[in-house]
Amino acid sequence: MTPDPFTLRSLGWSAGFQRQLAAQDSGTPARVTGVHRARLSALTTAGPVDLSLPPGLSAGDIAVGDWVLADPATGRAERLLDRRSRIFRRAAGEAEREQLIVANVDTVFITTSATDEFNEARLERYLALVHAGGVPPVFALTKIDRTDEPESYIGRLRAIGPDVPCLALNAKAPDAVAALRPWCGPGRTVAFLGMSGVGKSTLASALTGLDLETGALGADQMRGRHTTTAREMYAIPDGGWLIDTPGMRELRLTDMAEGIDAAFAEIAALADRCRFRDCSHGPEPGCAVQAAVASGSIDAARVDRWKKLRAENAEHSSAALERKRRGKTLSKRVRQVMKDKHGR
């Protein structure tokens, strides 16, 4: 289901993308709705198109929500436009490579449930991920019908994200869509992030009017469902777009120092007031963070989680830089060998 007629604005086009166009560009703007092994599904003002990947890029370099310049006549994507936001994580086993999740999103609903699944440490990782991508987060607390104390879960969410809007809802209730609607609308794109089973697909189905829980879609919607990313972009009937994402159990962080500090803003602000610039926020004298813990104004467990994420991020980022450095050195040596060979 897609809006009719299409306009660039209804697809999410903005002035930032328009400024990237050069006089010599003849391609048609196209919004990527699905990423497959060797091609892209996309939407233009004329309707859906299938495109080959841009030159020099692989499927892993493109995210659902991206904009490309395309030549519909040849079925080629000619150029990938710069993103205004992107959500990514470190790919498994490769510290130097990021795995794109979504691009050009306006709001991410970080979804959790009022059950034993609720986990502050995991939610803080999602917050860091979203902040690092430059996307405003919203907490969506589901399954409130399964607890007698929904306010206790809301309080825990406010403790880790005091400035993050929080919705408490039953994903299957008729008023669930109304609760989400303020963040949706023409030209806006939203996505859900969270563990499997928390109600993301139920909410996505309610927003789009499609059955995304069982995959029982019509022939048009089924095109390209077997993708490398398992992500698709669907129209919201009242305007806007939803990018459906799979549940993510593991979130590895790399190059997300700013996102981590944004997710722990009150602790990061205190850290700037420590006596020593290289304070480890442990036994050193003059540590503003530990002073706040001692006074009871900051939760010690939250500080420990902040330090753990910062250490993990620093380790992975350092490893990534070292691998890149070794790769550049090897490439330089190969070029020199080839140069010497041809010079003989």
Image (cartoon, rainbow, N blue to C red):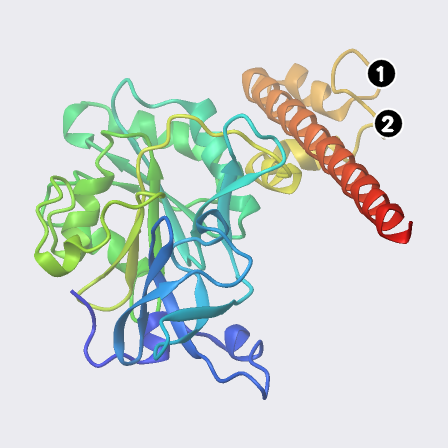
Q: Looking at numbered disc 1 in the image, what kind of residue is underneath it?
A: Pro
How far separated are the C-alphas under marks 2 and 1?
Answer: 7 Å
Q: In x, y percent, where is residue 1?
A: 15, 64
Q: Camera-side residue: 151 or 94?
A: 94
Q: Which residue is depicted at the point 56% across and 64% down?
A: 82
Residue 57 is left or right of residue 265, and the answer is left
Does residue 264 sit above or below 64 in this rendering? above
- How packed mark 2 is, by other alpha carbons closer than 10 Å (few <14, some 14-19, many 20 or more), is few
Does residue 168 sit above or below 103 in this rendering? above
Does residue 196 sit above or below 301 in this rendering? below
- Residue 111, quarter of the rendered image: top left
- Residue 202, quarter of the rendered image: top left
Q: Which residue is depicted at the point 72% across and 38% down?
A: 324
Q: Residue furthest bottom?
A: 23
Per the image, label 2 sits on a secondary structure element best described as: loop
Q: Looking at numbered disc 2 in the image, what kind of residue is underneath it?
A: Arg
- Residue position for label 2: 275
Q: Camera-side residue: 314 or 221?
A: 221
- Residue position for label 1: 285
Q: In x, y percent, where is residue 52?
A: 39, 63
Q: Which residue is depicted at the point 57% across and 30% down?
A: 94
